[in-house]
Image (spheres, helix red, strand yellow):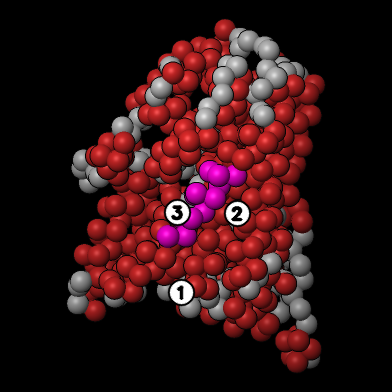
Amino acid sequence: MATTEASAPPRKRRFYTQLWFWVIVGILGGIVFGMLAPDAAKGSKWLADGFIQMIKVIVAPVIFCTVVVGIASIGNLARAGGLALKALFYFLVATVVALTLGLLAANVFDVGGGFTGQPSAAALESAAKQVQNGSNADQGGLTGFLLNDLLPTSFLGPFVENEVLRVLVLAILTACSVSLLAAPLRTRVVGSIETIAKVIFGIIKLIMWAAPVAAFGGMAYTVAQFGTQSLGELLKLMGVFWGTCLFFIVAVLGLVSWWAGFNIFKVIRLIKDELLIIVGTSSSESVLPRLLTKLEAAGASKQTVGLVIPTGYSFNLDGTCIYLTLGALFIIHAGGETLPIGLQIGLALLMVLTSKGAAGITGAGLVTLAASLQAFGGEFFTAEAIAVGIALIIGIDRVMSEGRALTNCIGNVVATLAIARWNGELDRERLAAVLDDPSLVDAAMELEHGAGRDAEPVESATSTEPEDKELVESAR
């Protein structure tokens, strides 16, 4: 009897006990509510905003703890530095490719070229706020970027202001300091920080129960707001953007995945729960802790996951990069102007810098676009032209924000697995097994995040206990 139980596969989790199911319910409910009662639905945006605000509270501590543990647990600064350099090189190449694709798509499809409408007064007012935010975020070149966005002004300030880039700098400095400690002391310090991270993950576990409600409110608002936008060029812009993101995922990330020895479509299936949460909340930061657990359980080393994923949230924003160049040329074309190819290349090079730090919070791409245009300057990007251009696309920005967040998320997952493969820190057999059967990571996800608890007890403790023990040990 024991042999039969040991060989019997555990039952699959019931779909209605899993978070992704209730997120879908929230999305569908939001669509129906937005269509039937658009005026009331516009008032439901606070549900999604409140959820994202709670997520933002713990993003900086998660990134700090994860990066410190990821680097310090290596115990060798030279090895950690080599991993970081490989990651930054990958991020730079991906950024250039994404920005170039946005330029090509904007020119090939002439987005904004046939626009004849005018933004509403409400859109202009909202755009003025975005331009003001963009002015405050203006990096002013490399020196301004280093002083205003990268280097901290205090230790606690970046956590209070949720400044991801500065938190990364503090995390790297802290990790280097911990790495120089004697081995026994380093082990105790890393263990303490890892314990703090688990407490933070517990907070996230509680917050994630509100994801379906946030998905309902966010989707209801999006449908109600989008229904008022009937201009064909805006729909064309949205379609070109989503199509370019899809091409980037299938062609570019697909090629990277093929080189690294895995299938991009299987990777997307593995993270489908996280992608659905992003669709509902329009924020990739809401799934950061889940990705950390899932990728480590899928075979990537803790060190690689702990360094690449948090760093990628600031330095590897593929969807945001596509949006920046595409949106900039839309604004130019909609104003009846053209930008010579030389200046387009110059704008793209500037956006290599300005795209950093625009982590996946809803609206960050819009602020970064305004900041990029102001930093570029020139006759095409006066304050008035920027305000009008932002006003034109602000109505559909949330729909495009979802595309940015989804592309950013998939890009960072592929980057983590590819860099782990490049650095020899990927268990390829484990990854192949997980991609063929994503349920193999369920035990780790439930252990860390309480995702998808079964209503029924597991049939066989014998069949799952060894894997659970292995996951617990690896987490330690």
- As drawn, 177 above or below 24: below
C-alpha separation, residue under disc 1 versus residue under disc 2: 20 Å
Task: Tell me which label, 1 or 2, sits earlier in the chain.
Answer: 2
92 inside magenta stretch = yes
C-alpha separation, residue under disc 1 versus residue under disc 3: 17 Å
Tag nearer the camera, 1 or 3: 3
Tag nearer the camera, 2 or 3: 3
In the rendered structure, find residue 453 and report the number of the disc placed on it: none
Q: Which residue is mark 1?
A: 423
Q: Nearer the viewer, residue 390 or 15?
A: 390
Q: Residue at the spot x=29%, y=73% of the render?
A: 78
| Residue 75 position in % (x across, y down) | 30, 75
Q: Amino acid at mark 1?
A: Asn
Write down the region rendered in magenta. Answer: 89-101
Q: Is residue 225 left or right of residue 192?
A: right
Mark 2, secondary structure of its residue: helix
Q: Amino acid at mark 2?
A: Ile
Picture quarter with the C terminus: bottom left
Q: Which residue is mark 2?
A: 410
Q: Which residue is mark 3?
A: 92
Q: Residue at the spot x=76%, y=31% of the render?
A: 31
- As drawn, 387 above or below 422: above
Q: Amino acid at mark 3?
A: Leu
Q: Nearer the viewer, residue 272 or 208?
A: 272
Image quadrant assignment for residue 404: top right
